[in-house]
Image: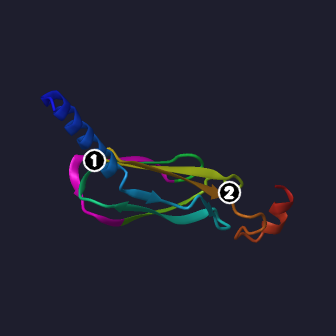
Amino acid sequence: MNSWKKTIAGVIIFLAALVAMAGAHEISAPAAVQADGDGHFLYAITVVITSAIELEVVYLDGTDNTDLGSWIADGFCMVIVEPGTYTEIMEGNLLDVAADRTIFYQQSMCDGWLGEVTTVILAPVVGTENESWSAVKSLYR
């Protein structure tokens, strides 16, 4: 086999290994979460890291009608994340309890893996507000 063919075959095997490693991590979160009568919500995002790797970035966008805001944590590919299961707790409040909204979470690692989840925060069911006027309010929704 020619040396250039060996080089190309080696590059293809290397790229295939990188793709396999990049797909090994997992992320999960509920598709929807019901807010309580005050618009408060709580849920967990779970990330499973299968091999030690550097953290690239974590991004959260909770600006769509929640008090979570938006934040970025940049690992600059310098923070080593050991294999294991990691849980990020999302807890906040709807700003307008009459409207459903979404929270977007993204995490990327320096091996090329990118995990994204979107969770819909469901507005409280009419009549479940914790205020004493909930029955009257429900007439006007």
| Rendered residue at 23%/46% (across/down) | 77
Q: Any mark on residue 71, and which?
A: none
For the question of whether residue 125 can be seen, the reply is yes
Q: Is residue 81 magenta?
A: yes
| Rendered residue at 25%/42% (across/down) | 13
Instruction: Please state the extent of the stretch shown in magenta in the rendering.
Output: 68-85
Q: Which of pointers 2 and 1 lies earlier in the amino acid sequence?
A: 1
Q: Any mark on residue 17, and which?
A: 1
| Rendered residue at 51%/60% (across/down) | 29
> Which quadrant holds residue 80?
bottom left
Q: Is the C terminus in the top left, top right, bottom left or bottom right quadrant?
A: bottom right
Question: Magenta residues: mostly which secondary structure?
Answer: strand
Q: Where in the figure is residue 110, as x and y percent of width and height?
A: 27, 46
> Which quadrant holds residue 120?
bottom right
| Rendered residue at 82%/62% (across/down) | 138
Q: Nearer the viewer, mark 2 or mark 1?
A: 1
Q: Secondary structure at mark 2?
A: loop
> Which residue in the protein does label 2 denote?
97
Q: Secondary structure at mark 1?
A: helix
What scheme was used to colour the molecule?
rainbow
For the question of whether residue 110 can be seen, the reply is no
